Amino acid sequence: MAKILITPRSLSKGGHPILHKLEEAGFELSMPSPGATPREDQLIEAIDGCVGWLAGVEPVTDKVIEAANDLRVISRNGTGIDNLPIDLLTKRGIKVCRAEGTNAKGVAELALTLTLSSLRDVVPTHTGMRSGEWPRRIGKEISDTKIAVIGLGAIGATYANMCLALGAKVRGFDPFAPQDQIVHPSFTRCDFDAALEGAEVVSLHAPMPKDGSALMDASALNRMAKGAIVVNTARAGLVDDDAMLAAIESGQIGAYATDVFHSEPPAPSALLQHPRVLTTTHIGGFTTASVDRSTQRAVDNLLDALVSHAH
């Protein structure tokens, strides 16, 4: 029986009712590491005999793809494909499908949560009270706050519209999104440097640059307003960690809130342990509705690629 590899942690832990569609279509499901990110050796062993792969954000090496003799399609339960060796997949004729926009609401809501929590200093205040103090740092309302949104895809545009609805002044940068992606009197489309100039909040919703360099380096952080907030629900590599730590310590950046890390769980670091850094465990798209939408789309994409072309 042809197999389908299932690796997203949100699906491998206890399965998901939508996965039954794959079994009904005659496929056997293989889950090598229930509830955990599979290692390279587990993937190499599990990929044997798999024609399809419902993939998460786990790193996929060339070695894994070289061991995939029967693989015809990889279907992501999200949008990012930075974790896949695209050149090799193209060379091998393995199709890659994405579940675009399905987790946009979940990720955008988390980005907004992190923005509001940072503007009102929620986490340091909570932590201070827990340790017997009574910290009261003056907060800032989101209304009239200058917010830069870097990347205006489904997630960035959803976040921008949420901020606009709350009265923020939003500037957006995206070289590829349609010009009419966001239409609002308080929204301005501009280039990267202009978006950052004097911004009080920057929220990142972009893929990694081709050369792998960080977008938020020392010069980018210094363009922002003093005491500004950076929110990252996109990719850890977009931020230069050393520059961020220095900017927080100098007071140039007031808070850094991130849901993404170089490895999961991340190694302890001076940046992640800093009291002005707010962290969440890569839960942006981890809501019941987002998981349902992403799984449905990923399963439909698999069946479309494997079943409809088989007849």
Image (spheres, grey):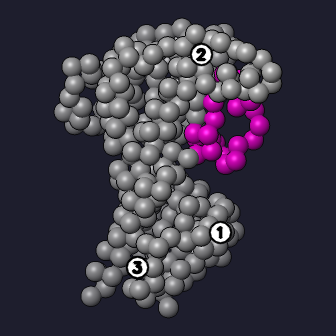
Q: Amino acid at mark 1?
A: Pro
Q: Is residue 201 visible?
A: yes
* In the depicted structure, whether residue 265 falls above or below residue 229: below
Q: Is residue 246 left or right of residue 151?
A: right
Residue at screen point 67% across, 48% down: 264
Badge 3 local density, few (<14 within 10 Å), some, or many (20+)?
some
Give the CA separation, mark 2 to mark 3.
Answer: 48 Å
User: Which mark is drawn over residue 34?
Assistant: 1
Element type at mark 3: helix
Q: Which residue is mark 3?
A: 21
Which is more N-terminal, label 1 or label 3? Answer: 3
Main SS, magenta region, reads loop
User: Which mark is drawn over residue 140?
Assistant: none
Element type at mark 2: strand
Which is more N-terminal, label 1 or label 2? Answer: 1
- Which stretch did the figure color magenta? 259-282
Q: Is residue 73 visible?
A: no
Q: Is residue 89 left or right of residue 171?
A: right
Q: Which residue is mark 2?
A: 254
CB under 8 Å between callouts 3 and 1?
no
Q: Amino acid at mark 2?
A: Gly
Give the CA separation, mark 3 to mark 1.
Answer: 19 Å
User: Which quarter of the figure has residue 302?
Assistant: bottom left
